[in-house]
Image (cartoon, rainbow, N blue to C red):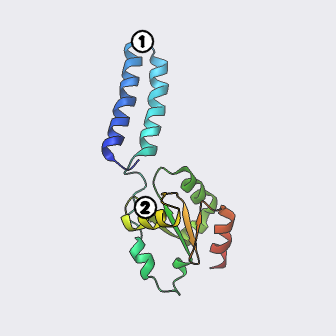
Amino acid sequence: MRSPWLWAALVAALGLVVLDAAADGRLGFAVGYGVVALAVAWWTSPWRGRRGGTTHEEVLSMADTDPRKGVVVYWRPGCGFCAMLRARLGALREQATWVNIWEDEEAAAYVREVNGGNETVPTVVIDGIPHTNPDPALVAERLREA
């Protein structure tokens, strides 16, 4: 969820459901739904996962001999497939270059370009070839080679 305003509206709507349930005396439901609402709010937060990482421009300017250029992962906060890839790579993930498309419009434009106009992530560029939501084993294999 890119827009902070849309995110705030979602949080407000979830909060109203919790307050309504509490006002009706359904405290168990209100607490349970409140926990779920907090998890959804955190997961979809536009500020979650911001690390000020590498930009698409920096990737383009990397020397061909730079080992970080071998695997570039274009991702965004709140993406379950991105989180799964990150988890499945384990310690190898530190060898890849991670570019947050929500912080870099050029990166988002690149992802749209290679995915038929869609911002589908993770888009992983391995040795210059883009792969949309690749098998983590493929990415791990290339990272082990580096």
Residue for badge 2? 101
Work out whether 76 lies above or below 38. Answer: below
Q: Nearer the viewer, residue 64 or 106?
A: 106
Please give the name of the residue rendered at 39% of the width and 75% of the height, measured from the top-left corner: 57
Residue for badge 1? 25
Contact? badges 1 and 2 (CB < 8 Å): no
Give SS at disc 1: loop
Q: Classify mark 2: residues with Cα within 10 Å, few (<14), some (14-19) or many (20+).
A: many
Nearer to us: label 1 or label 2: 2
Give whichever of discs 1 and 2 has the lower sequence position: 1
Residue 117: give x, y in percent of width and height: 48, 60
Q: Nearer the viewer, residue 23 or 78?
A: 78
Tag 1: residue type? Gly
**In the rendered image, which quarter is residue 22 located in?**
top left
Residue 40: give x, y in percent of width and height: 46, 39
The C terminus lies in quadrant: bottom right
Give SS at disc 2: loop
Tag 2: residue type? Ile
Work out whether 132 lies above or below 42. Answer: below
Please give the name of the residue rendered at 37% of the width and 64% of the height, measured from the top-left corner: 105
Please give the name of the residue rendered at 52% of the width and 86% of the height, measured from the top-left corner: 64
Residue 26: give x, y in percent of width and height: 45, 15
Q: How many marks?
A: 2
Residue 36: numbered disc: none
Q: Classify mark 1: residues with Cα within 10 Å, few (<14), some (14-19) or many (20+).
A: few
